[in-house]
Amino acid sequence: MLLAFWVHNLSPFLIRFNENIGIRYYGLAYLAGFVAAGWLLQRYHRVGRSPLDLNAIFDLMTALIAGVIVGGRLGYFILYQPEIFLHDPLVFFRVWEGGMASHGGFLGVLVALWWFTRRREVRLLQVSDLIVTVAPLGLFFGRVANFINGELWGKPTRVPWAVIFPASPAPPLPRHPSQLYEAALEGLLLFAFMQWRFWKSDRATVQPGRLSGEFLVAYAAARAVGECFREPDAALILGLSRGTFYSLFVVAGGLALIALAPRRGSQGKA
C-alpha cells in the first residue's frame, strides 16, 4: 500500500559542487523573497503609498537580510536546540546544516527595523506596516523550500496526497505535506489578506502599527492551524508544539498593537 504514495526524492540543490556546497533551493527561496519584497516596496513608493525611495529600500533590505538570518539562526538554537548551541556555539555558522526559526526571524526583523528607522529618522511602525504586507512572500518561498528539502514533515496520514519522506523516522509512513499547507496559509493566504488591507484601507496612514498587529495575529492563527498537521520537531511545552506555544506571544504582541493603534491617528477607512 505504501507504494501508492509519492516518495519524496527531491534534491535540496539546484546545482551541487560537493556534499555540502552548492546552490540550494533554500538560499534561492530567501533571495526570491527579498527580491519580491524590494519590488513591491518600490511600487508602493511610485504610487505614493510609501516614503521609502530606492536608496532607502536598498538600505532597508540589507538590514532585513542581516536581521532575518541572524535572528532566524539564533532563534532556532535558543528556542528549539539550546543544548546543541551551548555545547558547540560554532554550529551557528554551519548554515549548510540547516536550522532557522520564524519567530527568531521576527525578532531579528524588529531589531533591523529599529536600526534602520533610527538612521533614516522615519517612524518604526510606519515602516513595519509596509514590511508586513510583503513578508508573507518570504514565508511562502521558505515553506516551499522546506518541502523540497524534505524537512519539517507532517504527521502520518492516509489522505491521497500524502507523501513518504525517507528522512522521517522509521518505518517510512505516508505523511501530510505540512510544508505546503503552511506555504498556502502563512504565505499565499496571508499575503492576499495583507495586500487587501493595505490597498483597500488607510490604516497604514492613519493608524501606524495597526497592519503590523493584524499581521502578527493572522500569522499566529495560520501557524497554529499548520501545526495541527505538522510533526513536532522538539519537545512539547504545556501540551503545545513549540511553534504554537511561541505564537501565543506573537498574538499578544499583535493584539497590543491593534489596541494601541487607534490612539496614534485619526479614524479612517477600516
Image (spheres, grey):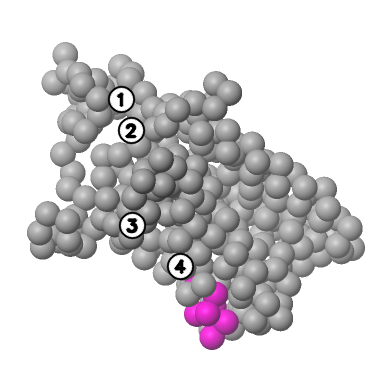
Query: Callout 1, which amino acid?
Result: Arg
Where does the image place residue 117, in percent across and percent down from the top left? Answer: 66, 75
**Image point (71%, 77%), residue name:** 122
Where does the image place residue 39, in percent across and percent down from the top left? Answer: 48, 72
Q: Mark 3 = which residue? A: 90
The earlier-in-sequence mark between 4 and 2 is 4
| Circle 1 or circle 4, nearest the eye | 4
**Image point (21%, 62%), residue name:** 23
Q: Mark 4 = which residue? A: 65
Residue 192 higher or lower than 50, as above or below: above
Q: Mark 1 = which residue? A: 175
Q: CA distance from mark 2 to mark 1?
A: 7 Å
Residue 187 visible? The answer is no
The earlier-in-sequence mark between 1 and 4 is 4
The earlier-in-sequence mark between 2 and 3 is 3
Q: Mark 2 = which residue? A: 153
Query: Callout 3, which amino acid?
Result: Leu
Q: CA distance from mark 1 to mark 4?
A: 33 Å
Say if mark 2 contacts mark 1, CB within 8 Å. Answer: yes
Q: Which range is magenta?
A: 55-61
Q: Nearer the viewer, residue 26 or 203?
A: 26
| Circle 2 or circle 3, nearest the eye | 3
